[in-house]
Every structure is written in structure tokens, then in C-alpha cells.
């Protein structure tokens, strides 16, 4: 929905960070029965970045956040709120407060949200409400994931897809509202299509009293169902967000979707009649970085000079939950 208010928001800075280690499709042949041709034709992915055991999610997120803060021309102490969208925190209790400390953002409230690959869009809408109501002026939103920690590297249906990374944006109070419209949705009936599920190990404490010792199973996914869901639901969400923002498809300058699969990006663009030159894609180099994929793609396009001030951007995330959401916004102050 679109909330009318005396305050608006502007996205004034972006940043991203990626691990240094790279594994391309040719090297994956050493792990599973696959090929560069098989992976490329089905996903569009050629390589992905992987975090080492020494690299933490909070460090990647802090690096991305610092770049966004610098672009926005504020300081960490100007921040009122930090939202971290992630499914893979360093600490199961949350990692946003670690990032707050590493940035030196001593005034900021910090918390995590989890909506998997939809996390950045859900976080964008959440952050906007704090600004629109006048509670906060400067909000840092980070999307970051290290999915390599939770991939079964013997399962070729999933291990070829995922990479690690972090992206961030700064949202600030503005005289006009540059978040033009949004649509958020969830459907728990399809939860089993994509999981990183709790897998308890029974442990008897005393006779007659047992608990489930905490651990998680690797990522599992029904790729065909996720593809079908995304191609159907994402265009609908974008159209509803455009309607609420009183914008047409022809007014979109750039389409930035969650970087899950090139075939999904192509299918969504085709259904919306958006030409290929308006579709931003970087999954060939980074794979699916979950909540980080949209802000990484946004930051790259901004720093390459593709996205200019006042450009209208349609973005959408979709994934586990199942969750999906779209937002229409204008870049810059």
C-alpha cells in the first residue's frame, strides 16, 4: 500500500561488498557432475563469490554500509536506525548490533529482519514507515547473506546457484516521497518449495524429558515450482506497485529484480513488456546472493553511471516463505 503523509523518503546512497574468493562453473565440475554449459543455459550464472571461514557477514555488511553512508554524505553518528535483512547472521540472535558497533553508529537502533530473498524489498518498505511517520530521519538498510555456509556442495540443483555478498542503501527524510508504491505478499502454503530448515537432534536430558538439539539442514529447493511461482507472481506485484504509484510500465527506466535466475528475469521482463536494455543483471558474476542481490545490482549500476538521479526503478524480490514484494522508487535526492 501507499501511505499518504507529510514526510517522504529518498534513497541517497548505496554500497556493496563481496568476498575475494571466486569459484567459476569449470571448478564446480570438481565437486559435482555438471558442466559450464549445463549451469549457464539453465541459470545464466558463470561464477560466484564465496566467503572464507575468516570472513564474517557483519564485516561484509559493514563494508557495504560504509560505502553507502559515504555516498549519502552523512556520518555513522547521523544514523537513527539500522535494518539488516539476512537469513544467515553470524549470530542466531542477530548481527545488526555488531554492524552498529563496527560502523560507530552509536545513536542508531539496530535489528535484523528475515524474509530470505525478499528481505531487501521488505526492509525497504519497513524503513520507509519509520521515516514517513517522522520517527527517524536517517535509516541504513543492508541486505547481506553468506549462503555458502548452508549449501550442500554435493547437490548440483542448489550448489551452482548461490554466492555471498552484501549491499546497502541509506534512506533519508525528504520533502517529496520518492518511494512511489509497493506491494508485499506471502504464501505459507508453498513453504516447502524452498527451505533452510531446522533439523532437531533428539537429546534426553533426564528420563522422560527430551529436547531437540539445534542444527539446520542444507538448503533444499524445488526449482520448477519456484520458477513457476516467480514468473506468475512477480509481474503482478510490480503492476500493483506501479498502479499505487500512478506510474505506467513505459515510465520505468530500470528493472532490478532479485538475481535468482536469468530465465526468470527474462520471463518477467517479457510479461511486462520491458525491453532487455532496461533490465539490470549481474548474476553471471555473482550468482544468487539472496537479500544482497538487489542492492549489489543497484550499487553497481549507480557507480557505473547507468542509473541517474530521478530515474524510476522497479524492483522486486521473491523467495523462501514463500514471500515476494515489489517497490517503485526514484533514485537520489
Image (tube, rainbow, N blue to C red):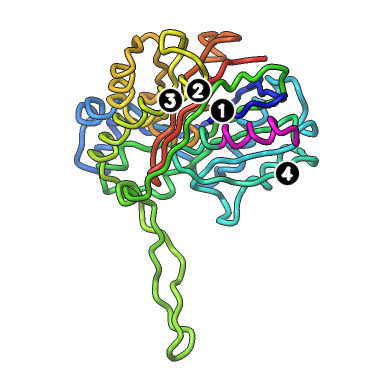
Whole-percent x, y for residue 137 in the image: 75, 30
Q: Is residue 145 left or right of residue 271?
A: right
Quick one: SS at disc 4? Answer: strand
Q: Check residue 32 in the rendering and tell me which mark sits there, or answer none.
A: none
* The residue stretch that appears in magenta: 123-135
Q: CA distance from mark 4 to mark 3?
A: 32 Å
Mark 1 touching mark 3, by CB under 8 A?
no
Residue 249, located in which quarter of the rendered image? top left
Q: Where's residue 68, x and y in %?
A: 65, 25
Secondary structure at numbered mark 2 = helix
Residue 119 is left or right of residue 286, and the answer is right
Can see residue 212?
yes
Viewer-side label of 4, 2: 2
The tag on residue 244 is 2
For the residues marked 3 and 2, what is the alpha-carbon distance in whole angstroms?
Answer: 6 Å
Marks 3 and 2: CB-CB under 8 Å? yes
Within 10 Å of disc 4 (Cα), the crowding (few <14, some 14-19, many 20+) is some
Q: Residues within 10 Å of mark 3 (few under 14, many from 20)?
A: many
**C-alpha gap between disc 4 and disc 1:** 25 Å
Q: What distance separates the C-alpha of mark 2 from that of mark 1?
A: 6 Å
Name the residue at 50% across, 38% down: 119
Q: Check residue 109 in the rendering and tell me which mark sits there, or answer none.
A: 4
Point out residue 82 in the picture as x, y percentages from the top left corner.
67, 39
User: How many residues crowd around disc 1 within 10 Å: few (fewer than 14), some, or many (20 or more)?
Assistant: few
Vertical side of 199 occupied by 155: above or below? above
Closer to viewer: mark 4 or mark 3:
3
Q: Which residue is mark 1?
A: 2
Q: Residue at x 60, y 37 (%)?
A: 126
Amino acid at each position: 500500500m501507499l501511505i499518504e503523509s507529510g514526510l517522504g523518503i529518498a534513497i541517497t546512497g548505496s554500497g556493496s561488498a563481496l568476498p575475494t574468493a571466486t569459484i567459476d562453473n569449470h571448478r564446480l565440475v570438481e565437486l559435482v557432475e555438471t558442466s559450464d554449459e549445463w549451469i549457464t543455459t539453465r541459470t545464466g550464472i558463470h561464477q560466484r563469490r564465496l566467503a572464507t571461514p575468516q570472513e564474517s557477514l557483519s564485516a561484509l555488511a559493514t563494508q557495504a554500509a560504509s560505502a553507502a553512508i559515504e555516498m549519502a554524505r552523512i556520518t555513522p553518528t547521523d544514523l537513527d536506525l539500522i535494518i539488516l535483512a539476512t537469513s544467515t547472521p553470524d549470530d542466531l540472535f542477530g548481527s545488526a548490533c555488531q554492524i552498529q558497533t563496527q560502523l560507530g553508529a552509536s545513536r542508531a537502533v539496530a535489528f535484523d529482519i528475515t524474509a530470505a530473498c525478499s528481505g531487501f524489498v521488505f526492509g525497504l518498505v519497513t524503513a520507509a514507515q519509520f521515516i514517513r511517520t517522522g520517527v527517524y530521519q536517517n535509516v541504513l538498510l543492508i541486505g547481506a547473506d553468506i549462503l555458502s555456509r548452508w549449501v550442500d556442495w554435493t547437490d548440483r540443483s542448489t550448489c551452482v546457484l548461490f554466492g555471498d555478498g552484501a549491499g546497502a542503501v541509506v534512506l533519508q527524510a525528504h520533502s517529496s516521497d520518492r518511494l512511489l508504491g509497493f506491494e508485499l505478499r506471502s504464501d505459507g502454503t508453498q513453504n516447502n518449495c524452498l527451505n533452510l530448515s531446522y533439523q532437531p537432534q533428539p537429546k534426553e536430558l533426564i528420563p522422560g524429558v527430551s529436547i531437540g538439539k539445534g542444527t539446520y539442514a542444507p538448503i533444499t529447493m524445488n526449482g520448477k515450482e519456484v520458477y513457476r511461482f516467480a514468473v506468475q507472481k512477480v509481474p503482478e506485484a510490480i503492476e500493483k506497485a506501479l498502479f499505487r504509484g500512478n506510474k505506467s510500465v513505459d515510465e520505468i527506466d530500470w528493472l532490478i529484480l532479485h538475481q535468482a535466475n536469468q530465465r526468470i528475469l527474462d520471463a518477467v521482463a517479457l510479461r511486462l513488456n520491458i525491453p532487455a536494455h532496461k533490465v539490470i543483471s549481474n548474476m553471471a558474476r555473482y550468482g544468487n546472493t539472496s537479500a544482497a542481490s538487489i542492492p549489489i545490482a543497484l550499487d553497481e549500476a549507480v557507480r557505473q553511471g547507468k542509473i541517474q538521479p530521478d530515474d524510476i526503478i522497479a524492483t522486486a524480490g521473491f523467495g523462501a516463505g514463500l514471500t515476494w514484494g515489489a517497490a517503485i522508487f526514484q533514485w537520489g535526492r
